[in-house]
Image (cartoon, grey):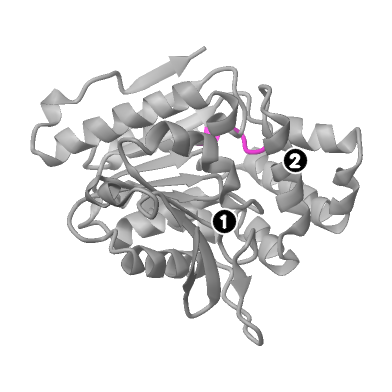
Amino acid sequence: MSYFSGSRCNMFYTDTAENNPASKDKPAVLFVNGWAISSRYWQPLLEKLASDYRCVTYDQSGTGKTVIRQNQQPSFTIEGFADEAAALIEHLELNKGRNLHIIGHSMGGMVATELSLRFSDSLLSSTILACGIFEENAFTSAGLMFLGGLIDFSMNFRNIFQVEPLKSLFIRRAATAEIKREYGNIIVEDFITSDKDATNAVGRFSIDRKVLRTYTKHVIEIASPVLCCVGMKDHTIPPEGTVTLYHTRKKKATSPTKLVQFMNLGHLPMLEDTERFAEQLKKHFESADQFHKNSPHEATGNDVLQIV
């Protein structure tokens, strides 16, 4: 566990290569967090991947142990969050050679997409988890308005989620399947203690039409294999958006796209079924490696996989 001094914040990060220097030579996996949560929720997944990969997590500005610089108001935008992550990638030299997998969860899927374009020469694969795209129609507009109102309410009254039964309701909205109490507590604690300006900004740009259009365009442009992954009982972000993302990339992108649907999981597959989520990631990483070795025909698995 270390700190990296960037231009906008003193960033807290973890790198499994610190305790295992030999892993510096292994493919790296960068984990990009969702809205109003620190990197702690990746820990169970890291335990499944660290023997084969160099795993790097970090707290974005406004969350966890990362400290925003005094007298500075950083840009809480996709580009701003990507800037700080890019600085960490370069600091740790994760961009040396084609050796990098990037995983983005929820809002982090937008940041991961931006990073995937910036580091296209270093990228082995991208994984977009629970961060979909939606057709622009009246139904979608109403849904985005409702989500915006929910964000406003949540931020204005977020301390109420410290007490039962609202605490349990908050956790169940994020995780449909049972998760360990430790991580339920982390989800609530991180949300309540996140920087209000950062959290409000992220909540708003995540439903901004212009931002969503740019995200859609950029996802298609990722030149490495992309895994679209979603819990089909997600009550936080409509899972159909990730399915739409898959079909859009499948139709227009030049690199492979795969969809994994966890039929009985919610917004946090990395906590709800760590074992099977890790298994699908490893298969994706191996398939991407074959793709970049100019042997795409050796990639295994169906384009769409439904896991019950």
Q: How far from the left and from the top, in percent, is residue 103?
A: 42, 45
Q: How far from the left and from the top, in percent, is residue 233?
A: 63, 24
* Residue type of the residue flagged with mark 1: Arg
Q: At x 48% / y 35%, what residue is drawn?
A: 45
Magenta span includes 138 = no
Q: How crowded is mark 2: few (under 14 residues within 10 Å), some or many (20 or more)?
A: some
Query: Label for residue 185?
Result: 2
SS category of the residue bearing label 1: helix
Look at mark 1 in the image and give the residue it sits on.
209
Query: Label for residue 199?
Result: none
Asked if residue 56 lies left or right of residue 149, the reply is: left
Q: At x 65% / y 84%, what residue is drawn?
A: 70
- Picture layout, residue 173 above or below residue 204: above
Q: At x 75% / y 40%, what residue is drawn?
A: 185
* Residue closer to the observer: 189 or 35: 189
* Residue closer to the observer: 175 or 278: 278
Which comes sooner in the sequence, label 2 or label 1?
2
Magenta span includes 238 = yes
* Residue closer to the observer: 235 or 45: 45
Asked if residue 134 shows in the view, the reply is no
Residue interval drawn in magenta: 236-241
Q: At x 19% / y 37%, what residue is drawn?
A: 289
Hey, which residue is sitting farthest bottom in the picture?
71
SS category of the residue bearing label 2: helix
Asked if residue 253 lies left or right of residue 171, the reply is: left
- Picture layout, residue 240 above or below residue 66: above
* Residue type of the residue flagged with mark 2: Asn
Asked if residue 41 lies left or right of residue 6, the reply is: right
* Residue closer to the observer: 142 or 157: 157
Hey, which residue is sitting farthest top in the picture?
308
